[in-house]
Amino acid sequence: GQQVMQIPQYQHVQEGEDFTTYCNSSTTLSNIQWYKQRPGGHPVFLIQLVKSGEVKKQKRLTFQFGEAKKNSSLHITATQTTDVGTYFCAADGGSQGNLIFGKGTKLSVKP
Amino acid sequence: DAGITQSPRHKVTETGTPVTLRCHQTENHRYMYWYRQDPGHGLRLIHYSYGVKDTDKGEVSDGYSVSRSKTEDFLLTLESATSSQTSVYFCAIRRPDFNEQFFGPGTRLTVL
């Protein structure tokens, strides 16, 4: 079945450094979503990308969807301790709104 | 958050016992989902529902059953719990005209 590969699995950064997580698919995606899960919490929707080459920004977060719609990235500029958590990408599973989640990137930020 | 509650929030049970987890929503949305989350595996879909009495299997449905007799409630049952079903279980809903999913707080289940 469809899979979404996400790398890296873990990322440890010093506060103020940048962070990027990548999501890749072998098939063309209709859209891609990003979620954040704080430690001990539940996943929370961040954004959805639909168009080829789309770039969206939310404050220090920049989301990109590849031209071929097979990859996506989330970049955080100047990380803060509030950015700690696991970031997941999710692709349309093609049936009844199902989502296929990547395995996530766990971000830790050292103050 | 989208009016989703899960019960119980924590449960410890023994191998072989039946367990039912409940997901309740206050907004009467059609689509509801059950996921399990395990280290290194991310979120995996167990079952989903697209209306009352309309359910279907997800990626990891073996050993689980679901029921939806009312719009607001989606039940996940482990008929005979096994240690491999120790996990955190999340329920989610999808609002009409939106593609994103909204998650409940989760249930941490330990099977001894």
Image (cartoon, rainbow, N blue to C red):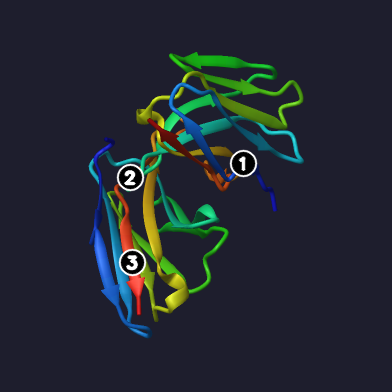
Per the image, label 2 sits on a secondary structure element best described as loop
- The answer to which quarter of the image holds residue B102 is top left
Chain letter of disc 3? B
**Residue B26 picture location, percent across and down:** 23, 42
| Left or right of A2 in this view: B66 | left
Identify whether B29 is placed above or below B108: above
Q: In this view of the protein, which residue sits in the foreground, B64 or A23?
A: A23
User: Split into 4 quadrants, where in the image is the C terminus of chain A?
Assistant: top left
Identify whether A46 is placed above or below A51: below
Q: Name the residue under label 2.
A: A41
Dot 2 and dot 1 residues touching (CB under 8 Å): no
Per the image, label 1 sits on a secondary structure element best described as loop
Q: Name the residue under label 1.
A: A8
Q: Name the residue under label 3.
A: B109
Chain letter of disc 1? A
| Mark earlier in primary sequence (2, 1) | 1
